[in-house]
Image (cartoon, grey):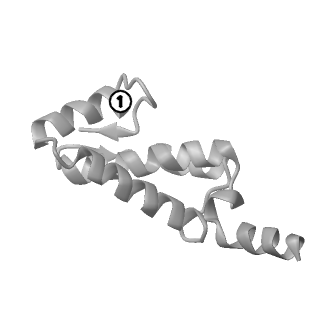
Amino acid sequence: MRLAIVIAFALASPALAQTQTQQNVMTHIARVVALSNKCAALKPNNMILGILMRQHGINLERQPYSDFVVGKGGEYAREIAPLDTAAACAMGRKLYGKAGEKVPDLLRD
């Protein structure tokens, strides 16, 4: 019985289906999307995003990957909601811009 509960939980939890590295990459993707939605001047660098997704075996057209990114994106969008557009743009450039502190070049002007 206990094994059945563990298996059911594992199947129901999208986060358990990915490695920690995949979760980290998808968290950055979600943040980039949320920042670009808040700041129209910034656009995701799709070439680098595609390379990262291929390198780490992430397919956003499939669950649980899509669910994870949508969930994290929503969390981050709520977190940055109080920022005005200029502050969101500045944050996006600082974290993911040309010389980004987190992942350089994921966002571009």
Residue corresponding to mark 1:
95
Residue drawn at 27 percent across, 31 percent down? 93
Q: State the image coordinates of residue 5 (x, y, percent, origin top left).
A: 79, 73
Q: State the image coordinates of residue 35 (x, y, percent, origin top left).
A: 28, 46
| Front residue of this view, candidates 72 and 32 | 72
Q: Secondary structure at mark 1?
A: helix
Query: In the rendered view, does 52 fall on the left or right side of 82?
Result: right
- Above-or-below relation of 24 to 103: below
Q: State the image coordinates of residue 108 (x, y, percent, origin top left).
A: 30, 38
Q: Residues within 10 Å of mark 1 (few under 14, many from 20)?
A: many
The number of discs equals 1
Query: In the rendered view, does 93 fall on the left or right side of 32?
Result: left
Residue 58 position by quadrant: bottom right
Residue drawn at 57 percent across, 42 percent down? 24
Q: Is residue 60 visible?
A: no
Q: State the image coordinates of residue 42 (x, y, percent, origin top left).
A: 24, 43
Query: In the rendered view, does 88 fall on the left or right side of 75?
Result: left
Residue drawn at 66 percent across, 72 percent down? 12
Residue drawn at 44 percent across, 61 percent down? 71
- Above-or-below relation of 84 to 15: above
- Above-or-below relation of 34 to 17: above
- Above-or-below relation of 43 to 63: above
| Front residue of this view, candidates 68 and 1 | 1
Residue type highlighted by circle 1: Leu
Residue 41 position by quadrant: top left
Query: In the rendered view, does 58 fall on the left or right side of 89?
Result: right
| Front residue of this view, candidates 74 and 98 | 74
Quadrant where the image shows the C terminus: top left
Q: Is residue 50 visible?
A: yes
Quadrant where the image shows the N terminus: bottom right
